[in-house]
Image (cartoon, rainbow, N blue to C red):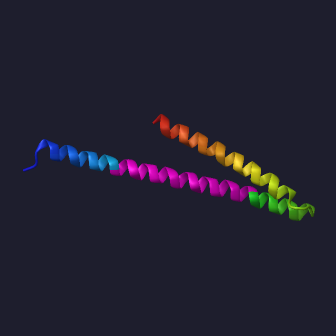
C-alpha cells in the first residue's frame, strides 16, 4: 500500500517530466523559427543578387534583416511563454 509521500513523489516526478518536455519543445520551436527566418532571408538576398547582377550586398542585407526578425520572434515567443 502506498502512503501519501509516495503519491506526492510520483506527482512531482510527473510534473518535472512534463516541464522538461515543455522546455524542450520551446527550445526546438525557437531553433526552427530561427533557421526558417534566416534561411528565407538568405534565399531572398541570393535571388535578388542573381537577378540584379550585384555583388553579395543583398545577401548581407537580408541576413541582418533575418537575424533581426528571428530575434524579434524569439522575444515575442519567450514573453508569451513566461506569461503563462
Which x, y percent locates residue 21? 40, 53
Residue pictured at 56% horizontal, 51% vertical: 30
Q: What stretch of residues is rendered in magenta?
A: 17-41
| Residue 64: x %, y % from top left | 76, 50
60 w.r.t. 79: above or below = below
Relative to 24, 5 lies left or right:
left
Question: For this rendering, which residue is in front, 79 or 44?
Answer: 79
Residue 84 point in image, percent of width and height: 45, 36
* Magenta-span inclusion, residue 8: no
Instruction: Please give left or right for residue 27 compared with residue 7 in the image.
Output: right
Q: Nearer the viewer, residue 4 or 53?
A: 4
Numbered-mark total: 0
Task: Please name the residue shown 63% across and 53% down the image.
Answer: 34
To which quarter of the image does residue 5 belong?
A: top left
Examine the image and state in which quarter residue 57 appears. bottom right
Task: Specify whether residue 32 is painted magenta.
Answer: yes
Amino acid at each position: 500500500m502506498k502512503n501519501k509521500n509516495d503519491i506526492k513523489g510520483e506527482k512531482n516526478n510527473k510534473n518535472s517530466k512534463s516541464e522538461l518536455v515543455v522546455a524542450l519543445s520551446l527550445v526546438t520551436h525557437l531553433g526552427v523559427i530561427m533557421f526558417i527566418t534566416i534561411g528565407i532571408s538568405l534565399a531572398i538576398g541570393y535571388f535578388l543578387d542573381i537577378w540584379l547582377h550585384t555583388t553579395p550586398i543583398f545577401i548581407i542585407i537580408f541576413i541582418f534583416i533575418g537575424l533581426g526578425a528571428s530575434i524579434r520572434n524569439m522575444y515575442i515567443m519567450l514573453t508569451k511563454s513566461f506569461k503563462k
